[in-house]
Amino acid sequence: MKIALLCALGMSTSLLVDRMQKAAADRSIEVEVDAYSVDDMDEQLKTADVILLGPQIRYKQNELFKKAKSANTPIAIIDMKAYGIRDGEKVLDQALELLDQ
């Protein structure tokens, strides 16, 4: 499974990526988690199983959600509290729940 985290430049989510990978490894879940700039959205829609957006790009929600819906890719905004404290467990759970819908 591939999870793409999108934020303004792809840098503010890097610590969260590490924590999500550790949470997945602790649960024996095979997952690829990477952070990208929101400008890479179109490319990520080709390969990602789920896309999570950093809260700081919430203002682009309408545009990005439309693109994801057209590509049939689950998408959500990362829970702000989980993002703020870099809670890899909670954000991984959010991604897994999106895939189950």
Image (cartoon, rainbow, N blue to C red):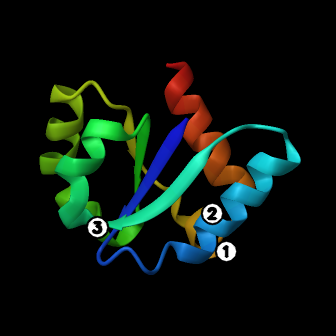
Query: Separation of disc 1 and disc 2 at Cα?
Result: 5 Å
Q: Is residue 66 visible?
A: yes
What x and y, as percent, mark residue 50? 43, 38
Q: Can residue 59 be seen in this view?
A: no
Residue 52 in the figure: left or right of residue 66: right
Figure quadrant of the N terminus? top right
What x and y, as percent, mark residue 37? 29, 69
Residue 84 in the figure: left or right of residue 59: right
- Going from N to C along the chain, the mark reached first, 3 or 2, is 3
Q: Are marks 3 and 2 in contact (CB under 8 Å)?
A: no
Find numbered disc 1 in the image and state the secondary structure of the residue it sits on. loop
Residue 29 in the figure: left or right of residue 51: right
Q: Which amino acid does label 2 sit on?
A: Ala
**Splitting the image into 4 quarters, where does residue 47 fall?**
top left
- The residue carrying mark 3 is 57
- The residue carrying mark 2 is 82
Q: Residues within 10 Å of mark 2 (few under 14, many from 20)?
A: some
Where 91 sits versus 70, above or below? below
- The residue carrying mark 1 is 85
- At x 67%, y 41%, the residue is 93
- Going from N to C along the chain, the mark reached first, 3 or 1, is 3
Q: What residue type is labelled 1?
A: Ile
- At x 49%, y 60%, the residue is 34
**Splitting the image into 4 quarters, where does residue 68 fall?**
top left
Find numbered disc 2 in the image and state the secondary structure of the residue it sits on. helix
Residue 45 in the figure: left or right of residue 70: right
Q: Are marks 1 and 2 in contact (CB under 8 Å)?
A: yes
Where 43 sits versus 8, above or below? above
